[in-house]
Image (tube, rainbow, N blue to C red):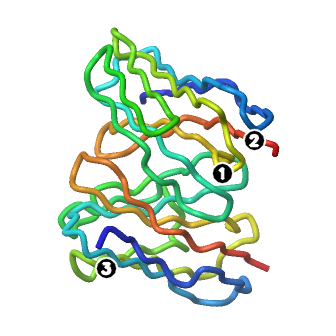
Amino acid sequence: TQLLEQSPQFLSIQEGENLTVYCNSSSVFSSLQWYRQEPGEGPVLLVTVVTGGEVKKLKRLTFQFGDARKDSSLHITAAQPGDTGLYLCAEYYGQNFVFGPGTRLSVLP
Amino acid sequence: DTEVTQTPKHLVMGMTNKKSLKCEQHMGHRAMYWYKQKAKKPPELMFVYSYEKLSINESVPSRFSPECPNSSLLNLHLHALQPEDSALYLCASSKVGRELFFGSGTQLSVL
């Protein structure tokens, strides 16, 4: 079974700061998705990365896929309170989506 | 329509009750999923339906019974649940092998 690791587990920052969270595996990803989940809601897809070395931008969010496709990062520039939530990475594996444990982000005003 | 609709939003039930969770999507997705999520944990897969056939059952107790009446609907029938079954139950759909679209979940409390 594919195991995903995410770091840090928790992150609390002030509004306006930058941050990076990470997702990695000992095995090669076929593709990787990032989701954000707010309390009491379902996860919402942010991006899918497929190609090693790929960089995708979504407003203030920048997603990178490692060259070897074994790691990915999510960088948020000038974080806002609306960015607060649980950030999950996931991979499609064996008819299932395997999720990492998540990074719980809190952005304080 | 890019929504997955789950009802009810909240459910409180006793250990002897029978209830059902419902999920609907109109995106033409042929894979539908039930996930269970405990507080501060990632979603854990319970069941996968692919082309209306049950393809994965992750050793879920028989007190949870899934049903896929057609390609747009997914139900989860609940019977004789335990307090430890209290959790957020998430439905999701996808094109087979593609990204998940989640509903907003049913917050279940078993008393």
Q: Secondary structure at mark 2?
A: strand
Front-most of B31 and A62? A62
Pointer 2 or 1: first along the chain: 1
Which quadrant is home to the N terminus of chain A? top left
The CA span between labels 2 and 3 is: 37 Å
Amino acid identity at mark 3:
Leu
Amino acid, disc 2: Val
Residue in the image at 56% along x and 67% along y: B89
Residue A1 horizontal side relative to residue B96, left or right: right
Measuring 38% from the left and 59% from the top, which residue is drawn there? B101
Q: Residue at x 68, y 43 (%)?
A: A80
Residues beneath discs 3 and 1 located on the same chain: no
In the rendered image of this protein, does residue A47 appear above or below residue B110?
above
Q: Residues within 10 Å of mark 3 (few under 14, many from 20)?
A: some
Crowding at dot 2, Cα within 10 Å, few <14 / some 14-19 / many 20+, comes out as some
Which residue is labeled 1 in the image?
A82
Q: Quadrant of residue A66?
A: top left
Residue under the image location 58 percent in, 31 percent down: A76
Tell me residue A28's x, y (percent). Answer: 34, 17
Find out whether the residues at labels 2 and 1 contact each other: C-beta distance under 8 Å.
Answer: yes
**x, y percent for residue B107:** 65, 72
**Image position of A25 (left or right of A109):** left
Where is residue A54 shown, x and y percent of the image?
Answer: 31, 20
The residue most toward the top is A68
Q: Residues within 10 Å of mark 1 (few under 14, many from 20)?
A: few
Q: Which residue is mark 3?
A: B73
Q: Is residue A49 above or below residue A83?
A: above
Whether residues under marks 2 and 3 lie with C-beta atoms below 8 angstroms apart, the answer is no
Q: CA distance from mark 3 to mark 1?
A: 32 Å
Q: Which mark is residue A107?
A: 2
